[in-house]
Image (tube, grey):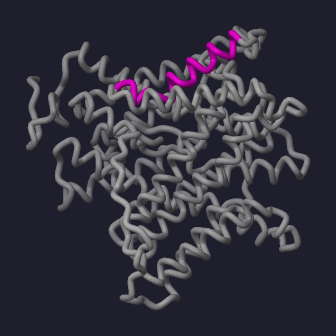
Amino acid sequence: MTSTSNDTGTLIYGLDDTPAPPAAALAAMQHILASIVGIVTPTLVIGGVLGLGEHIPYLIAMSLFVSGVATFIQCYRLGPVGSGLLSVQGTSFAFLGPVLAAGFAVKNAGGTPEDMLAMIFGLCLAGCVVEIVLSQFVDKLDRIITPTVTGIVITVIGLSLVKVGFTDFAGGAQAGETLGAPVNLLMGAIVVAVILVLTFVGNPMLRISAIMIGLVIGTIVAMVLGQVDLSRAGQGELLAIPQPLKYGLDFDIGLFLPIAFVFLVTAIETSGDLTANSVIAGQPVKGPLYMKRIKGGILADGVNSGLAALFNTFPNTTFSQNNGVIQMTGVASRHVGLYIAGILVVLGFLPVVGQVFLLIPKPVLGGATLVLFGTIAVAGIRILATQEIDRKKVYIMAVSFGLGLGVTLVPDATQNLPVFLKQVVATPITLAGLSAIILSLVIPDTDETAKPVETVAPVEEETATV
């Protein structure tokens, strides 16, 4: 089929156009380059922090496999499931906090890595039901999940994860006496510097691939410095066969609530991603077709996260940076999703991909995740900056940030609470989010708007976030 353009004339291939295979494959590879680090990094972080060791390559393989299947469902629609837009699905960073908290709870109780994974996947499988149900009421969610609440939660997600990223930056949780060694800080700083340089050089493809290129250059530098352990290269299985429920399932209501809350917030994020995708693809952003796509896309998020739990990986969501790829390439055809899905599924059968990522030294990974987690926090701040900050919002943010960051900085403050309550409030995302929701409902509205001390011109930011 010949190419078409949207109303603004910026598209080479519209949503329902079918690019020639070479063009579709090239566009698909650009999407893969922009998303693969985001797909595998949550698994690397979770595996490293929880000490999952030999399970990590298989978990990474499954993250790629499920992302491929999920992208196909999101792009092509299976009945009511899917948006029908060119929207790439991948492992969500938003769940890192509650997933790590659940893993540590099992680990501290004497559980094995298999026990931790069984609990995590059981919680995520139950949690996906929250998003599946909410997908049908997304048009009413804005009464509870306001931009203020969403901005607070996303900011706390990013800030609470900075400790994880900076620990790796300094050498990793298992570094012992080498934590903070100059060579570690040097490697992390090089990665940050590379990402910053590529982000501002002006080339769109380099900007979108900055994180991945930063990891590659950082690893090469680490090899020169003798900081890469090549003894693990080539070890492990040659083929990863997806095994549903390989680790089993477990459940704990106290550990479930934080994960359920993040599914609630993720539904709102997905709505925003799909709206932006619709704008770029020249599709309507109001009316029945738009709402059908939003509901179908959020429903796909929930269903795909359920598939992720069944196939031993972590919750999936839409990736916002791939909207930037569409804008850059001018290819919005959902048929490109078939190529993306196929490549990801094939990579998912190859544990060697996970083994390659395991060669990345902790400081190199930490340099990249430090930037990623920081940009998540900035995304939340930007949402808050769109609001008129009256007295009500000032105190909602003050209390929510105070509680959310307070429990992060002083985790022992909750040690004497009943186990169930401790599991809920010890997670900064849940505590900050619930505080914001409750205060939004109980504090009366006010027309008094707080005046900023100083007016600052908005800064134009082009960096794509994961």
Q: Position of residue 355 (x, y in %)?
A: 67, 18
Closer-to-camera residue (213/424): 213
In the picture, measured across the screen, residue 333 lies left or right of residue 77, that is left
Query: Which residue is depicted at the point 58% across and 27% down?
Result: 191
* 83 falls in the magenta region: no
> Which region is colored magenta?
205-224
Image quarter of residue 216: top right
Query: Which residue is depicted at the point 36% across and 56% down?
Result: 271
Q: Position of residue 290 (x, y in %)?
A: 23, 56
Q: Is residue 37 above or below residue 124?
A: above
Query: Which residue is depicted at the point 41% across and 48% down?
Result: 300
In the picture, measured across the screen, residue 63 lies left or right of residue 229, that is left
Closer-to-camera residue (353/379): 379
Q: Position of residue 90 (x, y in %)?
A: 48, 38
Query: Which residue is depicted at the point 77% across and 34% down?
Result: 172
Label total for image? 0
The prevailing secondary structure element of the residues shown in magenta is helix
Identity of the residue furthest to the front in this view: 454
Q: Look at the image and tell me in which quarter the N terminus lies.
A: top left
Image quarter of residue 118: top right
In the picture, measured across the screen, residue 437 lies left or right of residue 276, that is right
Q: Is residue 209 above or below residue 131?
A: above
Closer-to-camera residue (15/461): 461
